[in-house]
């Protein structure tokens, strides 16, 4: 929903808005623009500019895209590959793994 290129163009206020949205994505879909602006202590115009920076015509269009994103995330089960990768890093960060590396290095 938020591209890397768009995020690179964010100013400090945009970053605050982005972080809030990402951390409370489920809550945002039910908030009015005024509620979001009040929560972030910015004007509704600031929220609209943020929406426009992200290629939405307005807050309503932004919220619709957000709802679609939430639906897509819920429909996609976690990938097994990611779990395997996570397990690998957990094992690699263990003291037993470090001991094996040290043993291999000196023997």
Image: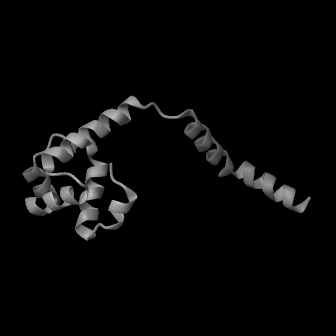
Task: Identify which residue is drawn at 20% across, 40% down.
Answer: 64
Q: Is 49 positioned to the left or the right of 88 in the image?
A: left
| Residue 55 in the image, given as x and y percentages of width and height | 24, 54
Is residue 89 toward the left or the right of residue 20 in the image?
Answer: right
User: Front-most of 106 and 48?
Assistant: 48
Q: Residue furthest bottom?
A: 11
Counting every numbered tag in the picture gives: 0
Please state which of residues 96 and 47 is positioned toward the viewer in this rendering.
47
Image coords of residue 99 (percent x, y): 78, 54
Up/down of 30 relative to 95, above or below: above
Q: Is residue 57 left or right of residue 11?
A: left
- Closer to us: 20 or 51: 51
The residue under the point 70% across, 52% down is 95
Q: Residue 34, how many percent across, how many down?
A: 7, 52
- The quadrant the C terminus occupies is bottom right
Q: Quadrant of residue 30?
A: top left
Horizontal and vertical percent for residue 22? 31, 50
Task: Relative to 41, say whether 68 is above or below.
Answer: above
Residue at horizontal 29 percent and vertical 63 percent from the top:
15
Quadrant position of residue 27: top left
Q: How is the image coloured?
A: one colour
Residue shown at 74% from the left, 49% from the top? 96
């Amino acid at each position: 929903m938020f591209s890397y290129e768009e995020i690179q163009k964010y100013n400090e206020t945009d970053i605050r808005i982005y972080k809030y949205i990402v951390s409370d994505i489920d809550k945002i879909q039910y908030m009015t623009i005024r509620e979001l602006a009040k929560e972030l202590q910015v004007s509704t115009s600031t929220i609209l500019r943020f929406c426009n920076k992200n290629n939405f015509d307005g807050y309503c269009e932004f919220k619709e895209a957000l709802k679609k994103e939430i639906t897509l995330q819920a429909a996609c089960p976690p990938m097994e590959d990611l779990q395997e990768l996570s397990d690998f890093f957990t094992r690699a960060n263990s003291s037993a793994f470090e001991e094996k590396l040290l043993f291999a290095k000196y023997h």
